[in-house]
Image (cartoon, rainbow, N blue to C red):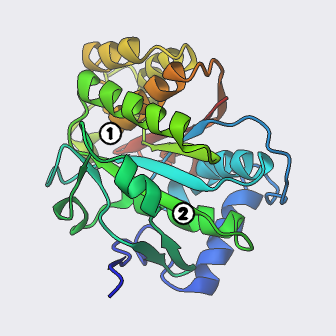
Amino acid sequence: MEYVRKPTVAGMFYPADKKGLINEIEHCFLTNPGPLELPIPSDDESSVFGVIVPHAGYSCSGGIAAHAYKTIRDAGLFDVFIILGPNHNGIGSRVALSPHDSWQTPLGTTSVDPILKKSLLGGIIELDDLSYRYQENSVEVQLPFLQYIYSEQSFSIAPIVMAMQDHQTSQKTGEQIAKIIKKDGRRICVIASTDFSHEGIGYGRMPPKELQVDEFARRQDSYAIEKILQMDSIGLFDVINEKEISMCGYGPVIALLSAAKFLDKTTVELLKYGTSYDLYPDSNACVGYGAFAIR
């Protein structure tokens, strides 16, 4: 019997019905802060090695995420997407590959790539069921976007969640992924899932008295964004610790940057940055979101 990973955050982070989900995704593309246009099918195969995307509810971060997914679709067809996200629960292996045969959303079922499921194992990446038994949005919210932009094409995924995000673990994860991509021969895109600063009393963090919560989040995020644009994974890890930046998926980002560096990818583009405050002004809470492309 096929082992299917059922949705855990449908009806919370995105609509639980197919029609509502399609409408929500299209809203993300067509309205601010989205790209204001739907992705157009392309066979261009322009250079995109990976993207960084947020993973909050679509109503908050979907517009930012849409920039990354439009960039992916503009780059033509990919065979496989390796999706890296933080393990917010911290339960399970330090770096866990999904053991499922497929993942399901209201838009359908997508296969977990059987080739990568074997080749990625060993070293720091483990096949672990426990990491996927609980609600985890970081990887799951990416799949409906992929299913939407490739509604007429087949692709597979390799979901990986990271409970450990220290620099050594993250770098080893990225280099292990890069070596597999180099040998595989198919067109593979790496997606790193993260939100940026979580600030305000709602997150148990108060900004300095002279700054509003959104101003502080933007300032904090600017330090991390600078290091990402420099492809400086060590600098990113250091500044997160020095400035106490509450970025939840820095491990996946470091893994992506490390994989890109290993494969001689040299360009990072900031596609869009914004905060939850832009859409829902709240003096008690603000989260930063960014979309990047690595080429």
Instruction: Please give the name of the residue rendered at 45% of the width and 77% of the height, measured from the top-left corner.
Output: 104
**Image quarter for residue 39?**
bottom right
Query: Percent position (x, y) of residue 194?
Result: 42, 42
Query: Percent position (x, y) of residue 27?
Result: 70, 66
Instruction: Please give the name of the residue rendered at 82% of the width and 56% of the height, measured from the top-left corner.
Output: 37
Q: Is residue 49 visible?
A: yes
Instruction: Please give the name of the residue rendered at 78% of the width and 51% of the height, measured from the top-left corner.
Output: 76
Q: Where does the N terminus fall, quadrant-wise?
A: bottom left
Q: Nearer the viewer, residue 52 or 95?
A: 95
- Indicate left or right for 39 with 186 as reference: right
Q: Is residue 212 visible?
A: no
Residue behind mark 1: 248
Q: Nearer the viewer, residue 6 or 78?
A: 78
Q: Where is 103 relative to 140, above or below? A: below
- Indicate left or right for 240 with 58 as reference: left
**Alpha carbon of mark 2 to alpha carbon of mark 1: how far?**
26 Å
**Image quarter for residue 290?**
top right
Residue behind mark 2: 156
Q: Nearer the viewer, residue 163 or 44?
A: 44
